[in-house]
Image (cartoon, grey):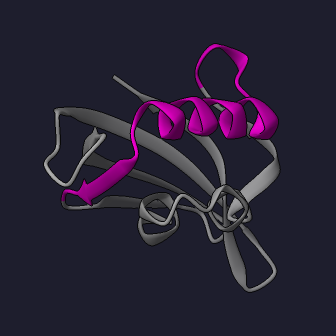
Amino acid sequence: MEAAAEARDSDALVENFADDFAGPQGMDRDRFRRYLALLWLRNRQVGVTLGPLDVELVGQDRARVNFTAAARGGTGWMPERAEVYQVKTGWRREGDDWKLISADWE
């Protein structure tokens, strides 16, 4: 997902989302795509670096994963802005794959 974000490939990034994904303020998969489009319009170059993952399994088919995400962007080769977010996610096993069911960041 990190590589898909840096490549500005929303289809590849969102393919890891469950159909019933829920983000902040009722954000669904489609609103998340629009959110990405807005970010990518404002930033020609995008970079994402994830901090250590804190994984907690909940039963056999659910997990919580918390981490930091440092996002940087700008119009040229040098980043003009950067933000560090605390990210909390929920995951569900669907067959052999894990799908993102929830995410929140601050």
Q: Residue at x 62, y 61 (%)?
A: 13
At horizontal 27% and vertical 39% (from top left) the residue drawn is 74
- The image shows residue 34, relative to residue 45, as above or below, that is above
Tell which of 38 and 100 is nearer to you.
38
Q: Residue 18: percent from the left, percent from the top?
A: 78, 54
Q: Along the horizontal axis of the image, is 72 left or right of 9?
A: left
Name the dominant secondary structure of the magenta segment. Answer: helix
**Numbered disc total:** 0
The part of the image, by quadrant, that contains residue 106 is: top left
- Which residues make up the magenta segment? 24-51
Magenta span includes 25: yes
In the rendered image, the vertical position of residue 98 relative to residue 72, given as above or below: below
In screen coordinates, is 61 left or right of 42? Answer: right
- 54, above or below 106, in the image: below
Placement of 46 over or under 33, stated as above or below: below
**Foreground residue among 35 and 17:** 35
- The percent coordinates of residue 54 (x first, y second) are 28, 57
Q: Nearer the viewer, residue 38 or 90?
A: 38
Q: Position of residue 75 (x, y in %)?
A: 30, 40
Where residue 27 sits: x, y (%)?
70, 25
The answer to if 9 sits in the magenta stretch is: no
